[in-house]
Each structure stands twice: as C-alpha cells, then as structure tokens.
Amino acid sequence: MQIKTETPQAGDTLGAEPSSGLTAQPASEADDAEPEVPAGVVAQLVFDFLRQLSTLSLAAAGGAVTLMQTALADSEFQGALIGGVASLFLAAIFSLQTQQVFVERLAHKTRTLKPAKTAVERFNMKRTPKTERVLTYLSFGLFGLGVTMVVWVVVMEFLLGSG
C-alpha cells in the first residue's frame, strides 16, 4: 500500500480518517500512481538544487585555480585548465541567474514582485519555466564540462606523465 498526502476526494473509502488528509491505495493503484508532492516542496527542492550547483561550481573553480597556481603551474595544459575554470565560473553564474529567474517568477505569481516599467525592460529575460529549464541545463552542462576539463588535465599531468 502507498500513502498519499492529499485531500481525500468524494468516494475515497480506503485509508485513514478524512480529516487527516491521508488515504491508502491498493497495491495495484499505487504501482501506477505518481506520488503527490506539494508545489512548495518542489520549489524548495529546485532552489536547493540550484544553490548546491552554484556552491559546487565555485568550490571546484577555486580548487582548480589552486591547482593551476601550485601543482600545475608549469603544465603544458594551462589553456585547458583555464577553460575548465572559466566553465565552472560560468556554471555558477548561470545557476545563480536561474535562481533569480525562479524566485522572481514565483514572486510574480504571488504579486509580491511587480515587473519593472522601464525602457530596459525589453532586455530582461522572460521569467518562464522554459527559461529556467534552459538555464539549468546550461549551468549543469558547463559544470560537467569544467569538471571534465580539470580532471582531464590532472590525468594527463599526473597519471599519464605527459607533462
């Protein structure tokens, strides 16, 4: 049996008391049903994911800069290492921008944030789920690219000894 956390509908006969908001489903229905997750929880998870991605990107970029200035100071792969660091910094920037778009879109839905009425308004990014998705994919892709480039330089320098 699977426990759903949603308001019981008329005709729900299985499960706990209607006032508790919990209903039990038979196993056959539970296998096909997707779990119900409140929108607030989803918003918090998305925001936390973006915050962690920006933190990891900045930490990895800082570590790569430290490697670049110490152990890999004389490396012939400095260009690839600089590219990896730049990619990691861009991943952090895009992740932070995605957080801003996400929060502004949610705030706009609650009428907490009013859109600006200026001439610069046409240059603003649209606050839509599609924009968030594109920025998330871009920041995650840049993070992967940056980490791959830094790991490639470390492998080439230390494990394969071609430096």
Image (spheres, rainbow, N blue to C red):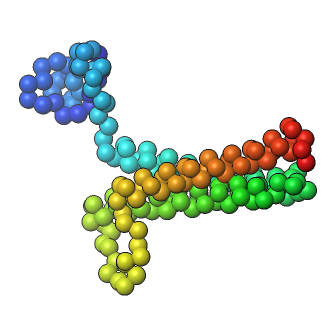
- Quarter of the image for residue 85 reads bottom right
User: x%, y% of residue 103?
Assistant: 40, 59
- Quarter of the image for residue 68 reads bottom right
Report whether 87 appears left or right of 46: right
Residue at figure coordinates x 88%, y 54% from the top left: 75
Can residue 94 be spotted in the picture?
yes
Residue at figure coordinates x 60%, y 60% from the top left: 90
User: x%, y% of residue 131?
Assistant: 40, 59
How many marks are shown on the rendered structure?
0
Residue at figure coordinates x 42%, y 56% from the top left: 132
Residue 141 vertical position relative to residue 8 in the rendered view, above or below: below
Report whether 39 appears left or right of 6: right
Residue 133 vertical position relative to residue 27 in the rendered view, above or below: below
User: x%, y% of residue 106?
Assistant: 33, 58
Nearer to us in this view, 36 or 137: 137
Residue at figure coordinates x 15%, y 27% from the top left: 18
User: x%, y% of residue 62?
Assistant: 73, 56
Tell me the quarter of the image containing the N terminus.
top left
Can residue 51 be spotted in the picture?
no
Report whether 80 appears left or right of 50: right
Nearer to us in this view, 87 or 95: 87
- Quarter of the image for residue 4 reads top left
Report whether 18 appears left or right of 85: left
Residue 2 vertical position relative to residue 156 in the rendered view, above or below: above
